[in-house]
Structures are given as structure tokens and as C-alpha cells.
Image (cartoon, rainbow, N blue to C red):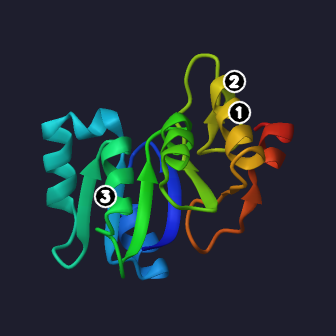
Amino acid sequence: MSVVLARIDNRLIHGQVLEAWVPHTQADCIVVASDKVAGEPLRRAVMTASVPKNIKLVIGGLTELAELVRQGMFAGRRVLLLFETSADALQGHRLGLPFDRLNLGNMHAGAGKLRCSCTISLDDDDIVNLRRLEEEQGVKIVSQCIPADRERPWRKLVQTGA
């Protein structure tokens, strides 16, 4: 299994992913790793309908997907791994989802969140989760909306805010 992109994007599967990231990374498999989404049949159906037939789509809970990785289900695949939240990314990595880089794509604004860019808003829990991924798990974390954009280290986003 080759994770060609691991990304936090609370929209999960949408135009940027399908039209920019899939071609750029030459992904042939999209994995949505979320306990929440795994339990939402309507949302799963909408995502399934939106993905081209030549791209394998797997939507599952974090523990389930980590077990599928251990079983070799994604062997030989170019996987685009999507998380809805920073907590999912941290837990997924701890369980064995293999990625050493993480892209922050879109993290919605909300009460108690610091707006760091036009697409990234982080609360204290997000910052703790990202620090743990970076410091404890050795994951390099950057923000990049689309492939044509310049990567920005996530810590610089937090320092400046928007």
C-alpha cells in the first residue's frame, strides 16, 4: 500500500479531491477513514455515487481500516487517505494507518476556533492532535488546498492566524 496523499478535509470527497488531487497523485483508491461516516448510510451512498468507477472507494471506521491494512487489502494500491478531523488522523495513525505526511485541506470554522487561513480553522484540540502527530508520531504536516498551491507548514498558520 502506498499512501500518495493523507489529507484532513471535513468535506471528504468533493471536486478538489476528485478533479485535482486524484489526477495529481495518480491515486487508484480513495479511503475515507471515519467512525462517524462509516455509520452514516446516506452519506456513504452520496460519496459512493460521486467517485468514478475506475477508482476503488473504501469507507470505514478507523479500527476496521487499520485491520484491512494489516491484512494487505490495499497492497499495490495508490491510496488517497481522507480524514474528517484531526482526532481521526491521530487515532488512525496510532492504529496503524501508514502515512508520514499529512495535508490540511479544509477544516471548518466554528466557535472557539482560530481562523488560520481561508480554509483552515483550528481549536485547541486540533492543535494538540496535530502536535502529537508531528512530535510523537513523526508526521510532517502542511497545508495545501490544491496541488498548484505552495505548501505551508501548519505551525506557521497557527503563528500568524488570518
- Marks 3/1 in contact by CB < 8 Å: the verdict is no
Q: Amino acid at mark 1?
A: Ile
CA separation in Å, label 3 and label 2: 32 Å
Q: Is residue 100 visible?
A: yes
Which picture quadrant has residue 150? bottom right
**In this image, 83 relative to 59: left or right?**
right
Which x, y percent locates residue 23?
41, 80
Disc 3 or disc 1, which is closer to the eye?
3
Of the numbered discs in the image, which one, if any, rests on residue 68?
A: 3
Q: Which residue is disc 2 drawn over? A: 124
Tell me what residue is drawn at x 71 percent, y 65 percent. 151
Image vertical order of residue 156 relative to residue 50, above or below:
above
Q: Residues within 10 Å of mark 3 (few under 14, many from 20)?
A: some
**Residue 69, located in which quarter of the rendered image?**
bottom left
Q: Amino acid at mark 3?
A: Leu
Secondary structure type for disc 1: helix
Query: Dot 1: within a 10 Å radius of its alpha carbon, few (fewer than 14), some, or many (20 or more) residues?
Result: some
From what the image shows, is residue 42 above or below residue 14? above
Residue 14 at least partly seen = no
Q: Foreground mark, 3 or 2?
A: 3
Residue drawn at x 83%, y 48% is 156
Pick the front one: 17 or 73? 73
Q: Which numbered disc flags the more N-terminal residue, 3 or 2?
A: 3
Residue at x 81% of width, y 45% of height: 155
Q: Position of residue 73 (x, y in %)?
A: 28, 68
| Structural distance between the alpha carbons of marks 3 and 1 | 29 Å
Mark 3 / mark 1, whichever is N-terminal: 3
Helix, strand, or loop for circle 3?
A: helix
The residue carrying mark 1 is 127
Q: Residue at x 69, y 23 (%)?
A: 124
